[in-house]
Image: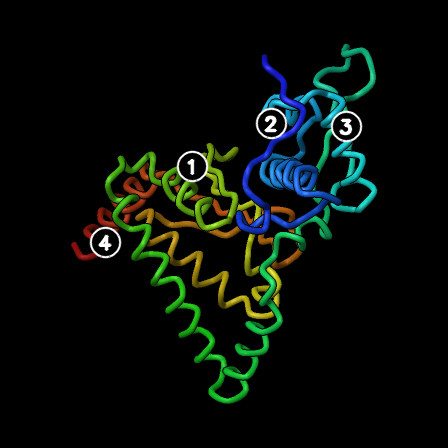
């Protein structure tokens, strides 16, 4: 593959990425390294180099800076088999400090506004605000998600969320169905104080996908990733069919 020593892409601040280095070029590239670790971590140095087209030396330099700044931390990958030889590969993940660098600067203002709303009008007002917020999300995502086959809607939702800065992905869940993961939450600090935001978002996901969903983990509650289980459409249709049969049997 062709290596480049650095990148000269747009400024990180303009792209919603924190400034992490001493000069423009270094800062831009280091921000891209941090963003990839946020989205795909745990990830190895070689994988980062392949995605960014950087030399191993350049990747190591940026990783050393990010480690020194506490933005990332190092982990060892689990061995694939007992017969595997050699030292476990080094993997890199984002830290809480690194994640915070991506958080919007108006968290405190938003949290104070919601606290004022709750104090003056009650928790119901916060719930209504949360529903209003996700109604805009549904309006923007709805058409693009409805236009794809049902089995592809979780992926379409992940792509739409990523455009809005949630670094989302979708894949098959271990226990069946699908799993929607958000590796970044722009409102995590506010949602930690007002879980109504997460609850409204989860309900919106269910309406957009047209199947039951269940939130398994959230960044707002201290988890590394917001994880939502998406029930398979086949299971939903089977359950609905059984419910109708049971209802018909009872009425008979």
Q: Position of residue 82 (x, y in %)?
A: 77, 15
Residue 144 in the image, given as x and y percentages of width and height: 28, 44
Q: Earlier in the sequence, mark 3 or mark 2?
A: 2
Query: Which mark sits nearer the N-terminus, 3 or 1?
Result: 3
Crowdedness near tag 4: few (<14), some (14–19) or many (≥20) residues, C-alpha within 10 Å: few
Q: Regarding mark 3 in the picture, which secondary structure is present there?
A: helix
Q: Given contact means CB atoms under 8 Å apart, are the residues at marks 1 and 4 in contact?
A: no
User: Disc 4 on helix, strand or loop?
Assistant: helix
**Image spot of residue 97 (x, y percent):** 73, 52
Among the two numbered marks 1 and 4 on one chain, the one whose residue lies closer to the N terminus: 1
Quadrant (top left, top right, bottom left, bottom right) of the N terminus:
top right
Identify the secondary structure beneath mark 2.
Answer: helix
Question: CB of mark 3 within 8 Å of CB of mark 1?
Answer: no
CA distance separating discs 3 and 4: 63 Å
Residue 52's disc is: 2
Specify whether 87 is left or right of 225: right
The residue that mark 4 highlights is 247
CB contact under 8 Å: marks 4 and 2 = no
Q: To which residue does mark 3 refer? A: 60
Q: Give x and y (percent) for residue 151.
A: 33, 34
Label of residue 177 in the image: 1
Write the residue at 49% across / 65% down.
197
């Amino acid at each position: 593959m062709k290596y480049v020593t650095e990148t000269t892409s747009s400024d990180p601040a303009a792209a919603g990425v924190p400034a992490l280095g001493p000069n423009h070029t270094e800062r831009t590239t280091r921000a891209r390294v941090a963003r990839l670790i946020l989205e795909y971590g745990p990830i190895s140095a070689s994988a980062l180099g392949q995605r960014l087209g950087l030399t191993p030396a350049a990747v190591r330099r940026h990783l050393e800076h990010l480690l020194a700044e506490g933005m990332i931390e190092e982990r060892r990958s689990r061995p694939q088999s007992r017969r595997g030889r050699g030292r476990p590969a080094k993997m890199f993940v984002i830290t809480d400090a690194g994640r915070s660098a991506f958080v919007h600067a108006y968290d405190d203002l938003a949290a104070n506004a919601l606290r004022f709303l709750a104090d003056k009008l009650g928790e119901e007002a916060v719930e209504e605000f949360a529903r209003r917020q996700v109604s805009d999300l549904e309006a923007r995502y709805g058409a693009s998600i409805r236009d794809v086959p049902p089995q592809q809607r979780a992926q379409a939702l992940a792509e739409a969320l990523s455009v809005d800065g949630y670094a989302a992905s979708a894949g098959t869940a271990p226990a069946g169905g699908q799993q929607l993961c958000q590796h970044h939450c722009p409102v995590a600090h506010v949602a930690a104080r007002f879980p109504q935001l997460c609850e409204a978002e989860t309900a919106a996901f269910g309406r957009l996908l047209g199947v039951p969903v269940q939130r398994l983990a959230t960044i707002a509650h201290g988890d590394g990733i917001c994880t939502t289980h998406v029930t398979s459409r086949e299971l939903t249709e089977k359950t609905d069919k059984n419910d109708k049969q049971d209802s018909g049997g009872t009425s008979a």
